[in-house]
Image: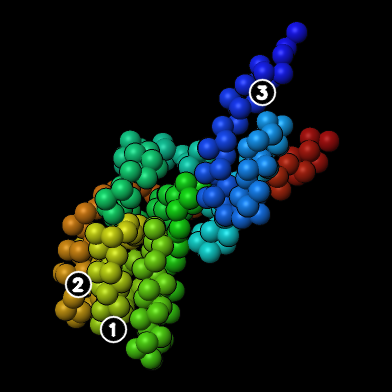
Amino acid sequence: MTTHASTTTQLLGAADPAQLQGRAQALRLLGLLAHWDAVQGDPSRLGWTRDLLDWEETERSRRSLERRLRSAHIGRFKPLADFDWDWPTHCDRAAVQELMTLSFMADATNVVLVGPNGVGKSMLACNLGHQALIEGRTVLFTTAGQLLGDLSALDSDSTLRRRLRHYSAPDLLLIDEVGYLSYSNRHADLLFELISRRYENKSTVVTTNRSFQEWHEVFPNAACVVSLIDRLVHRCEVVPIEGESYRLKEAKERAEKKAKLRAAPARKAKKS
């Protein structure tokens, strides 16, 4: 038969008062903390309080993730589990899987995914961003066109500084499609300013279809291109991806499937 003392010991072992109080303080549950003497003096209340803290932490984590997902603007993307590793002619799978551990963020290392259109650069960047969100980090996804168009449209210096702080703030910034358009000297200066602000402080992931030697064509006549590349790659993991467009492959497969479906009734009619 279980004694009252053993029951109390079991409850206290499963719900340590000091640990529970620390969790309540982290959650800023001031009402609960104000009556903590009454809680810790009753083993049954300690057990209930443990459940309450579990529920509150779970709900806050869920709401925090939803909020950060909305703010990240990542949108829909294919999960890494569905990536066809056999399709690219070259892609360092081990390097990508190591990046997914987010160890590069510990020392503010940047990541540059380089390759032609349709090989999965944006998809991999989105997966990195999503993993960072799951681990409680702040993330922002933007295309180079959106980013530079936004910054260049601001006339006021104070407004521009605030917007630069907005892009500098996330733990992980994803800049997609550098190289698909060409930009003016002002655009180059703005990107250099942003990369400089994040340099050695926070990680930035860039996807590009151009080698660094070709960035002079992306920012023609811009004096800061060499400095921009230097800041970006000083602490950087460059992952080249080579191959044909996977989107084009999927489009061809859909077209072939539709053609077979359209041809099926004709074959049945011919047999009959």
Mark 2 — residue? 225
Q: Are marks 1 and 3 in contact (CB under 8 Å)?
A: no
x and y percentages locating residue 49 in the rendered image:
67, 40
224 in relation to 6, above or below:
below
Mark 3 — residue? 8
* Nearer to me, 56 or 5: 5
x and y percentages locating residue 22 in the rendered image:
52, 44
* Nearer to me, 249 or 234: 234
Taking the spot 72% from the left edge, 14% from the top edge, the residue there is: 3
* Nearer to me, 250 or 171: 171
Sequence-wise, the earlier of marks 1 and 3 is: 3
258 in relation to 74, above or below:
above
x and y percentages locating residue 223 in the rendered image:
16, 79
Quadrant of res 100: top left
Q: Are marks 2 and 3 in contact (CB under 8 Å)?
A: no
Q: Secondary structure at mark 3?
A: helix
Mark 1 — residue? 186
Sequence-wise, the earlier of marks 1 and 2 is: 1
Query: Mark 1 against mark 3, which lies toward the viewer?
Result: 3
- Check disc 2 and give the amino acid type: Val
Taking the spot 73% from the left edge, 12% from the top edge, the residue there is: 2
Q: Residues within 10 Å of mark 2 (few under 14, many from 20)?
A: many
- Check disc 3 and give the amino acid type: Thr
Taking the spot 68% from the left edge, 31% from the top edge, the residue there is: 43
